[in-house]
Image: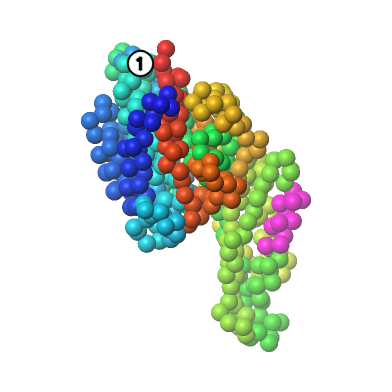
Amino acid sequence: MLDDAKGFAVDAIALRHELHRWPELGLHTPHTRDAVLAALEGLPLDLTLHRTTSGVAALLTGDRPGPTVLLRGDMDALSLQEATGEDCASRIDGVMHACGHDGHTAMLVGAARMLAERKGELAGRVLFMFQPGEETGHAGALHMLDEGLLDLPPHAADGSPSAVEHAYAIHLTPNAPTGVVISRAGPLLASSDSLTIVVTGRGGHASQPHAALDPIPVACEIVQALQTMVTRSIDVFDPGIVTIGRIAAGTTNNVIPETAVIEGTMRAISARTRQRLQDGARRVAEGIASAHGASVEVIMGDGYGVTVNDAAACETVLSVAAAVVGADMTVRLATPTMGAEDFSYIVDRVPGAMLFLGCTPHDRDYTKAASNHSNTVVHDDAALPIGIAMHTSLALHHLSH
Ligand SMILES: [Zn+2]
Ligand SMILES: [Zn+2]
């Protein structure tokens, strides 16, 4: 399988480099979509161009009836200035493919080409989902679901419903050697909710605090109390995180400002802890503000849910990986990681699994490699044929019988 996939690697690597040079942000990635469409040209695919985003759904119909397997690749980049010095480094100031989504797109195109050649072997269909807007809460996957991603016409061979029954996604990670496949059953990634707290007091002269109502010490107390709330009210075996990433207040050293703003993120791997964090953050902020006579507004943005891998789908990933890369390169992850993914919306509706694919060359120390979202992160091209082989093998696992 891997040898076959290597036949598609040259084109996949060229496509990744092209996308890497011209990264795009958010829900509208027209250049990326056009590059994907050009690379898919001539293949026997039914294409649906989404209207609300640059999403593309490409349906490959096998010669015999059967269920549909969804394979997903995300297409968007991040707002940061690339500093890798690579030949294919971003040509766009302040935008970089720092999460490997260029590779995800290229691997999915490669898999579409490879599976199209094997259409005669397929009992069922493959739905290739090219989605923008994974990063920074754009929820591109949710937009595509809302636009009917899973509402497929009947299978052309016999008119059977051929619903989407399995879903898989690959995420490149520089924190493992190239070719290592990592996954786990159950929660893989966390929910992510934004938190904004606006404390309002009363401005005044710094020398007359009794005549004003200083929001700054109140905000400081809230930040501290949020950490106590986490350690004292969240079960350590069902973890949660509150990180305050920004505090803003005041203009100069001798003025008491009217407001102080706190911004952060809350992460959990269960609905129970997610709710406890939301309730706790509100209680702490309102209670402390009230104790000091200040008023407070707590705004929580409902972000991505927990990405929960279906147990059977995860076993499929690990057994397919053992065949593609070898059992010694297949890792069952002990614990979830607290990042977040909008693939969570897909696996909420369809049993499926995400896997991590290592992409730091074996002659370099992966424990010291720059992580995703770093402006020096580099993704090894040698991972691409392995991702193509994984996508293809996962589809064939369900559809070739
Ligand atoms: Zn990312
Ligand atoms: Zn990502």
Q: What is the quadrant of residue 201 in the picture? A: bottom right
Q: Residue furthest left?
A: 42
Asked if disc 1 is less than 8 Å from ligand 2, the answer is: no
Residues rendered magenta in the picture = 223-233
**Secondary element at tag 1:** helix
Eyeballing the image, is 332 above or below 365? above
| Residue 151 located left or right of residue 248 | left
Quadrant for the N terminus in the image: top left
Disc 1: CA contacts within 10 A as few (<14), some (14-19) or many (>=20): some
Q: Position of residue 49 (x, y in %)?
A: 29, 38
In magenta stretch: residue 101: no
Q: Position of residue 371 (x, y in %)?
A: 54, 50
Depth order, front residue of 357/146 = 357
Residue type highlighted by circle 1: Glu
Q: Position of residue 339 (x, y in %)?
A: 56, 46
Mark 1, residue position: 121
Quadrant for the C terminus in the image: top left
Q: Residue at x 72, y 60 (%)?
A: 225
